[in-house]
Amino acid sequence: MLTGAIDTAQVPEGPSIVILKEEAAGFAGRTVRHVHGNSREPIQRMAGQRVLGVHSWGKHFLVRFEGFNLRVHLMLYGSYRINERRDVAPRVGLEFEDGSELNFYACSVKFIEGPLDAAYDWTADVMNDAWDPAQARRKLRARPQALAADALLDQQVFAGVGNIIKNEVLHRIRVHPESRVGALPPRKLGELVTQAREYSFDFLHWKKAYVLRQHYQVHTRTVCPRDGHRIAYRKHLGVAKRRAFFCEHCQRLYPRE
């Protein structure tokens, strides 16, 4: 039986959802005995249904049943518990015949009808085996005026990339977040695509080892470890209006062409 309690320590990004998928993998093949929660969705439809599998796409956690799927998005403050409950009502909780349970809090719940392959482009998920970097480059070239910061947060291009990964990737490749995608040299565009995936797997490794924060170079930092200059901060940057931490000394601003 699965044991323990798992909570998200930061705003959930793709690697955190991969960890959730791995922790919840043991529920596959089990039958839901009872459903509870305060979601307005018709969650009771899962009662009596057998879990066929658990999956992730970007920031979405997916529970597959016969003919339909439960999609959970942890949003900004969502969390989950396996075989434990918090003192507040969950958005949705699944209880199984063997006494195990899976509970989600402060999240978005939605049902997806039909096969997942019809709803999701797996090649856009930076942590999926089907990830297609060439397709990501094509999508970026079609958005030449987008800021690099906004491009990395576009879930149709980089599903799973969140604000931490965005800030760290741009620092790693020495690109200012306000650079225009169309102004990036081909080599830099290629580095952005490559590191969106590679840093996500670094994130996964560090988070599993409970050392993720120790590896932040710019996110929530005040001094750049590369050159010692003070880290710049924007509370709302770009169309996404997300926090940005960057070094104006070593991260080059590529202007609009």
Image (cartoon, rainbow, N blue to C red):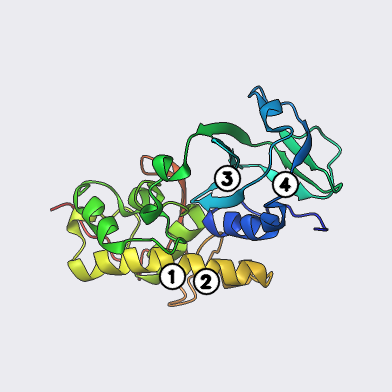
The amino acid at mark 4 is Tyr
List the residue tagged with mark 4: 80
Circles 3 and 1: CB distance less than 8 Å?
no
Q: Earlier in the sequence, mark 3 or mark 1?
A: 3
The amino acid at mark 3 is Leu
Q: Secondary structure at mark 2?
A: helix
- Asked whether residue 158 appears in the rendered view, the answer is no
Q: Residue at x 31, y 54 (%)?
A: 148
What's the CA distance linking mark 3 and mark 1?
23 Å
Image spot of residue 127 (x, y percent): 47, 61
The circle on residue 198 is 1
List the residue tagged with mark 2: 202
The amino acid at mark 2 is Asp
The circle on residue 150 is none
179 to 65, vertically: above or below: below
- Residue sitting nearer the eye, 253 or 33: 33
Q: Nearer the viewer, mark 3 or mark 1?
A: 3
Circles 2 and 1: CB distance less than 8 Å?
yes
Q: Secondary structure at mark 4?
A: strand
214 to 85, vertically: above or below: below
Label 3: how many Cα within 10 Å (few below 14, some 14–19, many 20+): many
